[in-house]
């Protein structure tokens, strides 16, 4: 007896079964993710006041030898990184502190809580501080350079930075004076200081004539000055002329500049006279 021919399977049924399984798997993953989120929960960061997932807070902010000193972490990782960056930039390496309790942090805690960039800065600062405690270590005097080197007395007196190539005289503690011994440099600096002092002294007693420009020295005496070269007469305080249509001889003290002590409003006798006049007027009113 001949068997009935087999009916081919429906192609649509074959292709849709895997799609259904994938859809079921995706739904299961989403449900699992929601369950994880619910389990994780969220809480507010005490620094940024944002609602942050609980897994974004360190479990224990820092180690402590006394269990009662431990506290919950209320600062998120992001704020910890920002806090440590500011601490490293403004403090010594051993002075970094917890933002919650101000306890000093050690290297392992900084490594765990800081960004990699901040941690490298922290290590550089700690190493530099350690080397600075050594008598023979000298930091580069260049303000733009953070390098340094060990420099013993037997090495001479010229410090050459291996980072910026700046050269400094360690005896004089100044940029290296090329072509001069330390004695010559000190002598030249002393002469320069004396010259500066002399120039400052001359500037206090000497002023140029406003008419011909020649330097005039005046130690004492009246502030009505006459130039010995051009015979120009002027006020030593404000340089206004005495001669001419607008000169002090014709216009009086109003010809002085308002900042000059001889300007009418700046004269003490005039102010005293005004006060006395006001006093007399007030007595008459009474």
Image (spheres, grey):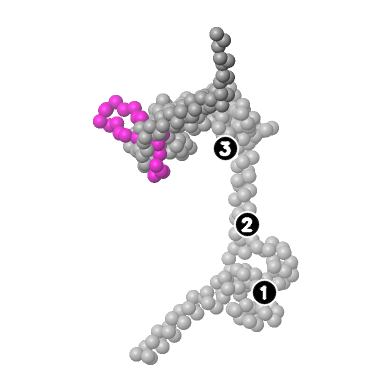
Residue range corresponding to the magenta coloring: 48-73
Q: Residue furthest top?
A: 1
Label 3 CA crowd tier, 10 Å (few <14, some 14–19, many 20+): few
Q: Which mark is residue 143?
A: 3
Rendered view: 163 above or below 200? above
Tell which tag, 1 or 3, sits nearer the viewer: 3
Q: Does 64 appear in magenta?
A: yes
104 on left or right of 253: left
**Residue 17 in the image: x percent, y percent?**
51, 25
Q: Residue furthest front?
A: 1
- Disc 3, SS: loop
Q: Residue at x 62, y 58 (%)?
A: 203
Q: Does 207 appear in magenta?
A: no
Report the residue marked by disc 1.
241
Tell which tag, 2 or 3, sits nearer the viewer: 3
Report the residue marked by disc 2.
202
Q: Looking at the image, is mark 1 or mark 2 earlier in the sequence?
A: 2
């Amino acid at each position: 007896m001949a068997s009935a021919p087999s009916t081919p399977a429906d192609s649509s049924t074959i292709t849709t079964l895997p799609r259904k399984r994938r859809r079921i798997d995706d739904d299961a993953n989403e449900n699992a993710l929601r369950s994880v989120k619910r389990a994780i929960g969220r809480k507010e960061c005490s620094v940024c006041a944002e609602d942050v997932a609980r897994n974004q807070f360190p479990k224990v902010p820092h180690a402590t030898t006394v269990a009662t000193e431990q506290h919950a972490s209320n600062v998120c990782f992001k704020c910890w990184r920002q806090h440590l960056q500011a601490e490293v930039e403004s403090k010594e390496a051993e002075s970094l502190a917890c933002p919650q309790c101000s306890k000093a942090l050690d290297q392992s805690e900084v490594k765990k809580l800081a960004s990699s960039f901040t941690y490298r800065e922290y290590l550089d600062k700690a190493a530099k501080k350690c080397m600075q405690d050594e008598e023979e270590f000298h930091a580069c005097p260049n303000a733009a350079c953070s390098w340094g080197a060990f420099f013993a007395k037997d090495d001479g007196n010229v410090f050459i930075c291996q980072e910026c190539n700046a050269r400094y005289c360690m005896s004089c503690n100044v940029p290296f004076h090329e072509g001069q011994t330390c004695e010559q440099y000190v002598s030249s600096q002393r002469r320069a200081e004396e010259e500066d002092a002399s120039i400052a002294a001359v500037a206090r007693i000497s002023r140029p004539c406003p008419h011909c420009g020649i330097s005039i020295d005046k130690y004492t005496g009246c502030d009505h000055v006459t130039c010995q070269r051009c015979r120009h007469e002027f006020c030593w305080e404000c340089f206004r002329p005495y001669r001419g249509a607008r000169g002090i001889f014709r216009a009086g003290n109003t010809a002085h500049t308002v900042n000059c002590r001889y300007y009418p409003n700046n004269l003490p006798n005039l102010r005293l006279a005004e006060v006395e006049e006001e006093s007399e007027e007030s007595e008459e009113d009474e």
